[in-house]
Image (cartoon, rainbow, N blue to C red):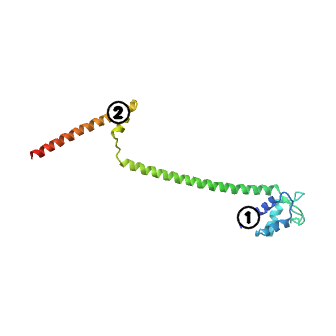
Amino acid sequence: MKKDDIYIEVLKFGRENLHKAITFKDLTGYLDKHKINYNDFITKHIFISKFINQKGQGRNINNEPDKNGLFILGNEGYFNLLEHEELKSANSSSRTATYFATAALLVSIIATSLSTYFFYRQQDSVTRLDELQIKKILSIKDTNTNTQLKDIIQKQIEIIDELKKIVQSDEQAINKNKQQN
């Protein structure tokens, strides 16, 4: 058990018994029953400072808990326990948020890496359009950009046709040379 836990255990016992008054002996019995190691001096100090009797005091003249007196947890002790529990809850929530943020960062890094990989992979490959794709592009409504795109595609088609004619004439010249030799 941590050093500060005795303080919290004493306050928890007080909260569990808010509906009835307790004695210092009840508290030590609870600590013994739950096998909680405690220092008698520290426990007395916590009891004196956080529990009050019917007169609003936690101690007698000798600064000792009244052995026969009945006490309840005071407001300060109750709110100290609430603050402790809220802090533990906030720590847990913070830890959960950190896990989610870490997961989100990992997803982001992986997505960025994949995107970069596919970008470079696509950059090295040649893009080809078949006739059906070209016809679909040409059938798009005329806008300034589409008109320019159609002109570019039309010029490419004309260049391809010219190249086919050149290749055919070269093939014919090669065949003619073969026949003459």
For image coordinates 41% across by 48% down, the residue present is 119
Dot 2: within a 10 Å radius of its alpha carbon, few (fewer than 14), some, or many (20 or more) residues?
some
Residue 69 vs residue 173: left or right? right
Q: What kind of element bears circle 1? A: helix
Q: Amino acid at mark 1?
A: Asp
Q: Amino acid at mark 2?
A: Lys
- Residue 8 pos. (x, y %): 75, 62
- Camera-nearest residue between 14 and 41: 14
Residue holding disc 2? 150
Disc 1 to disc 2: CB gap under 8 Å: no
- Above or below residue 109? Residue 8 is below
Residue 61, picture quadrant? bottom right
Dot 1: within a 10 Å radius of its alpha carbon, few (fewer than 14), some, or many (20 or more) residues?
few
- Camera-nearest residue between 40 and 175: 175
For image coordinates 38% across by 35% down, the residue present is 137
For image coordinates 35% across by 37% down, the residue present is 134
Counting residues from the start of the chain, the first of labels 1 and 2 encountered is: 1
Residue 161, picture quadrant? top left
Q: What kind of element bears circle 2? A: helix
* Image mark for residue 152: none
- Camera-nearest residue between 114 and 138: 138
Residue 53 vs residue 149: left or right? right
| Residue at far left of view | 181
Q: CA distance from mark 1 to mark 2?
A: 79 Å
Tally the numbered discs: 2
Quadrant of the image containing the N terminus: bottom right
* Image mark for residue 5: 1
